[in-house]
Image (cartoon, rainbow, N blue to C red):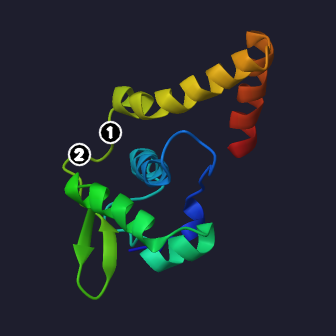
Amino acid sequence: MAAHSAHLFSIVPGASEPIYRQLVDQARRLVAGGQLAPGDAMPSVRQIAQALALNPMTVSKAYGILETEGLLTRRRGVGMLVAEAPEPRPSVASRIDLLRPTLERAAREARQLELDADIVLALFTRILKEAS
């Protein structure tokens, strides 16, 4: 059971999406992508709140939603853990569904900046390869 750092998460304070929702969506993506595996210990509410300069209630709200959804489970004396999943990994289609809102926001911003689609796609490809 690995303990994960609060630095797994990042927030965009000025985004239209509430901070708790950003945390929930990031946790979903981390689990779907395999960076968080069943049984992995999550950083504490306090650790995330301190690392990201957030109100602990905001982090607690995100964890509560994830627990209600069955993505996280609370274990006394240990804290929050990634719940055991019935399937080893979500389907490609469900992982694409998790990525789509992020790409829609990026596309909207690219249009606002009047950037050519080919340039944006080339940048995205370069970023994907850098992260590998």
Q: CA distance from mark 2 to mark 1?
A: 7 Å
Amino acid found under the numbered disc labelled 2: Glu
Residue occupied by mark 2:
87
The image position of residue 13, as x and y in percent, is 62, 52
Mark 2 and mark 1 residues within 8 Å of each other at the beta carbon: yes
Q: Is residue 130 above or below residue 79?
A: above
Q: Secondary structure at mark 1?
A: loop
Q: Secondary structure at mark 2?
A: loop
Q: Quadrant of the N terminus?
A: bottom left
Amino acid found under the numbered disc labelled 1: Pro
Camera-nearest residue between 46 and 28: 46
Residue occupied by mark 1:
90
Image position of 37 (left or right of 126): left
Image position of 28 (left or right of 46): left
Camera-nearest residue between 45 and 40: 45
Residue, x 52% and y 77% (percent of image)?
A: 47
Q: Is residue 45 above or below residue 101?
A: below
Image position of 108 (left or right of 87): right
- Judge whether residue 19 can be spotted in this image: yes
Residue, x 78% and y 26% (percent of image)?
A: 123
